[in-house]
Image (cartoon, helix red, strand yellow):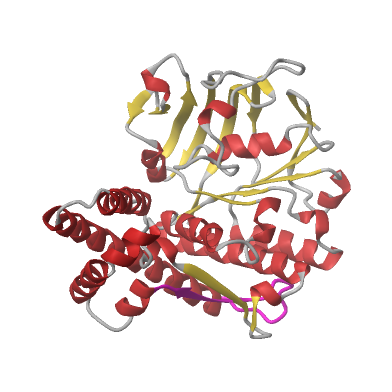
Amino acid sequence: MLHAAILKLSLTGFRSYPAAQVAVEARAIVLTGPNGAGKTNILEALSFLSPGRGLRRAQLADVGHRPPGAHAPDAEGAPWAVSAFIEGALGEVRLGTGYDPAQEGGQRRCRIDGEAVPSANAFLDHLKVLWLTPEMDGLFLGPPGDRRRYLDRLVLAVDASHGTRVNGLERALRSRNRLLEENGSGRFLDAMEHEVAELAVAVAAARLETVARLSAEIAAHRDEASPFPFAELALDGAVERLIAQHPALEVEDRYRALLRDNRPRDRAAGRTLEGPHLTDLSVSHGEKRLPAARCSTGEQKSLLIGLTLSHARLVGSMQGLSPLLLLDDVVAYLDAERRAGLFEALARLGAQVWMTGADPSAFAALETAARFTVAPGTITRA
């Protein structure tokens, strides 16, 4: 299996960095420094080498550098850029992305070896980026929308077209809701619901397939000695239940009929009340057969780490290329046994992993790691 790697990262006007460069040659990269030094900013920059809004889900205008003490930025924000020379699926290549409110309508720009590409979806041909952050610790207790976004990122890593389908479904649902609000004609609603049904079944089917593949991956690598419990996964959604029982074309017809019958109810609610846009991801502690939401905080964090490792293995086995892993402050609340178990699992995975933490001693066991000290605006080799 090939292993994707960042060879050199360059930041311009990104968050706390007016300009910075990091050259690496290791599989494990450790970034340490005090809270607020800018460690997570580096991982966020790397996360922009994938589709979407990065690991913080930030607005493009909020990412540009602002010197300490500067007034709040205007609505358009400041320009910024991220560039990385990588070893990817197709060999060595330079990926670049950025934002300039004065150019191209203030849209995010993406380039591969200096040539413009339509979107960051093109980066998926070269690199897959996965991440785990402290903000995700509340995933199992938060609203279903958080778990859907998490699920869709799992799917996107193995199906590059998934993001386009999800965005298309969201647009189609907004159009249907607007037609209902405006008492649009039945003919227009029929046409819109035809599109909604096609996209809904495609999105739901992709999610189901990824969950099935991930569940098989978890079962194949189940290790009773692992400090990270295995997870049991399921999807809770009307369309997903139909797909499990009927052919896809029949499910489209059934869902289309459901949308038609539900028009009065949906018009009154101001939104579509049935569909994959409301699906929830159910996660349970496999050994205890306990829903993740009822597990302890430590067990929930361990489940997330185990899921991340399983997903990384799945991506690697399906693509023949291990993904880039970004682990933000993951080891801070792990005991010595779980920390050692994580480092062993990462070594077996073989992926390039970028990790952050405040305490350098927490990473002492990673003898071959490249270590960097982070201070506001600077990154230096430790």
Q: Which of these two is toward me, 42 or 322? A: 42
Which residue is situated farthest in the left direction here? 187
Left or right of 261 on screen, residue 321: right
Foreground pick, 254 / 340: 254
Q: Residue at x 38, y 42 (%)?
A: 121
Q: How far across and down, in percent of the image, does residue 74 sit?
A: 57, 18
Was residue 122 drawn as part of the magenta stretch in this picture?
A: no
Marker count (numbered)? 0
Dominant SS type (magenta): loop
Q: Quadrant of residue 103?
A: top left
Instruction: State the extent of the magenta-drawn residues as a range.
Output: 221-237
Q: Residue at x 60, y 56 (%)?
A: 350
* Vertical placement of residue 262 versus 129, above or below: below
Q: Residue at x 43, y 59 (%)?
A: 155
Q: Toward the viewer: 347 or 82?
A: 82
Residue 223 pos. (x, y %) = 65, 79
Indicate the quadrant where residue 22 lies.
top right
Is residue 278 shown left or right of residue 144? left
Percent across and percent down for residue 146 are 55, 57
